[in-house]
Image (cartoon, rainbow, N blue to C red):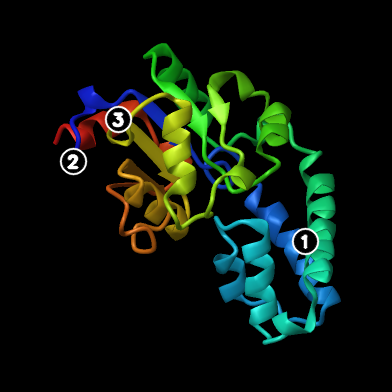
């Protein structure tokens, strides 16, 4: 594990790390599932976490074995309908929706001249950051449509390091999903899992919730 002194940047997932927009994804996807008469289950709820839009749709359709019943055009239309509803929901976000502890953590990183980028599967990330009024903290946002593979592939976190102009070993990635932790690890970065330590057991460092995440704690873990 890297020593903290080698760390120069941080790459953030968005949903569940900076704001609780995951609930809006669930609401929007559940509406699509209901329309298609597909039962909404805990497996679907957890399965869509951290993966891109089309992968989420395929997971839902495959849960009932009906993916082949829809043409590519129909799948695109379903994904668009979900996103339209999701955008309506996230338009209600305010700075108060930044998760506990994250305002302070971002400010601490900035005060210590540590660069930050966003590695989210959401194509709406720039809009969400603007609604939360935290865009200025970040050097850039990875465009998920421009990477070859979504999470759990390493592409998006590898790109997040490139945005920071840093080698991966100098970057810490923060995630709340298994797919995201795999992505960070395979990109060669230091993974910080936020949430259930058993579920996120592959993370190098674990925190129960965002309010527990501090630069001092990360430094202590890396210098242990």
Please, is residue 99 above or below residue 84 in the view? above
In the image as oriented, which residue stretches furthest toward the bottom?
Answer: 65
The quarter of the picture where the C terminus appears is top left
The N terminus lies in which quarter of the figure? Answer: top left
Q: Name the secondary structure under disc 2.
A: loop
In the picture as drawn, the residue positioned furthest to the left comes out as 224
Left or right: 206 in relation to 107: left
Q: Are marks 2 and 3 in contact (CB under 8 Å)?
A: no
Q: CA distance from mark 2 to mark 1?
A: 40 Å
Disc sitting over residue 149 in the figure: none
Q: Position of residue 57 (x, y in %)?
A: 69, 68
Q: Is residue 93 above or below residue 28?
A: above
Q: Secondary structure at mark 3?
A: helix
Pointer 3 residue = 170
Mark 3: few, some, or many residues within 10 Å (few <14, many ≥20)?
some
- Counting from the top left corner in percent of width and height, residue 89 is at 80, 47
Residue 20 visible within the image: no
- Eye-nearest disc, 2 or 1: 1
Nearest to viewer (mark 2 / mark 3): 3
- Residue 12 screen position, x and y as percent: 48, 37
Left of 101 or right of it: where is 9?
Answer: left
Mark 1: few, some, or many residues within 10 Å (few <14, many ≥20)?
many
Q: Secondary structure at mark 1?
A: helix
Q: Is residue 46 above or below residue 106?
A: below
- Which residue was labeled with disc 1? 79
The disc placed on residue 1 is 2
Q: Earlier in the sequence, mark 2 or mark 1?
A: 2
- Lower sequence index among marks 3 and 1: 1
């Amino acid at each position: 594990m890297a020593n903290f002194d080698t760390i120069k940047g941080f790459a953030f997932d968005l949903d569940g790390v900076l704001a609780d927009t995951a609930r809006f994804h669930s609401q929007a996807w559940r509406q699509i599932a209901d329309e298609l008469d597909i039962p909404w289950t805990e497996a679907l709820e957890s399965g869509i976490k951290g993966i891109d839009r089309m992968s989420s749709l395929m997971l839902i359709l495959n849960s009932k074995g009906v993916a082949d019943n829809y043409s590519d055009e129909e799948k695109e239309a379903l994904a668009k309908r979900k996103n339209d509803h999701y955008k309506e929901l996230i338009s209600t976000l305010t700075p108060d929706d930044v998760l506990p502890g994250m305002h302070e953590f971002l400010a601490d990183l900035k005060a210590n001249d540590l660069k930050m980028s966003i590695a989210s599967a959401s194509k709406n990330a720039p809009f969400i950051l603007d609604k939360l009024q935290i865009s200025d903290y970040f050097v850039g946002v990875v465009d998920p449509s421009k990477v070859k593979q979504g999470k759990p592939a390493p592409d998006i976190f590898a790109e997040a390091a490139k945005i920071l102009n840093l080698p991966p070993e100098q970057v810490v990635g923060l995630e709340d999903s298994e797919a995201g932790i795999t992505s960070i690890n395979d990109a060669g970065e230091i993974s910080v899992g936020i949430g259930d330590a058993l579920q996120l057991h592959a993370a190098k460092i674990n925190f129960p919730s965002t309010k527990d995440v501090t630069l001092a704690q990360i430094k202590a873990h890396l210098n242990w």
